[in-house]
Image (cartoon, helix red, strand yellow):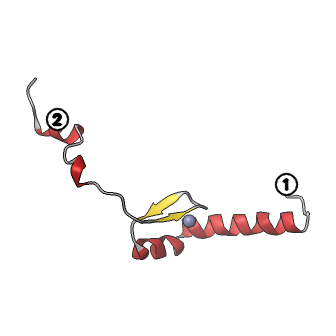
Amino acid sequence: MRLTHETYISVLSGVEFIVTTQAFYCKLCKEFAGDASCAEHHLQSEHHYKKYIVSAVIKFASQFNIGLY
Ligand SMILES: [Zn+2]
């Protein structure tokens, strides 16, 4: 087998350099953020804001037994 540059990329070389670490995770969007700055950026995103509004409406409706259609 002839090894090319593409071959080295596809064999997961350097696995020993990957370590576990703490990160931030948005349970609403199911997205990871690697650090506080990325987490803050995520919280300011339109994507997150829309999900937050939908979840707030659903939570409000369920608390007051209001049916959504
Ligand atoms: Zn989010």
- Judging from the image, what secondary structure is the residue with disc 2 in? helix
Q: For disc 1, does the CB lie below 8 Å from ligand 1? A: no
In front: label 2 or label 1: 2
- Judging from the image, what secondary structure is the residue with disc 1 in? loop
Q: Nearer the viewer, residue 64 or 51?
A: 64
Residue at image mark 1 = 69
User: Is the residue 49 above or below the residue 20 in the image?
Assistant: below
Residue at image mark 2 = 7
Whether label 2 touches label 1, CB < 8 Å: no
Question: For the residue marked with disc 1, what is the amino acid?
Answer: Tyr
User: Is the residue 67 above or below the residue 16 in the image?
Assistant: below
Which sits earlier in the primary sequence, circle 2 or circle 1?
Answer: 2
Q: Is residue 47 left or right of residue 32?
A: right
Task: Judge the density around disc 1: few (<14), some (14-19), many (≥20) Cα neighbours within 10 Å.
Answer: few
Ligand 1 quadrant in view: bottom right
Across and down, in percent, residue 53 comes to 69, 69
Q: Nearer the viewer, residue 21 or 69?
A: 21
Quarter of the image for residue 55 reads bottom right
Q: Residue at left 28%, top 54%?
A: 18
Q: Residue furthest left?
A: 2
| Picture disc at residue 61 | none
Q: Is residue 24 left or right of residue 2?
A: right
Q: What distance separates the C-alpha of mark 2 from that of mark 1?
A: 52 Å
Q: Residue at left 86%, top 67%?
A: 63
Quarter of the image for residue 48 reads bottom right
Q: Is residue 6 left or right of residue 35?
A: left
Question: For the residue marked with disc 2, what is the amino acid?
Answer: Thr
Across and down, in percent, residue 61 comes to 84, 65
Q: Nearer the viewer, residue 46 or 40?
A: 40
User: Is the residue 17 above or below the residue 64 in the image?
Assistant: above
Across and down, in percent, residue 27 comes to 59, 61
Quarter of the image with the C terminus in it = bottom right
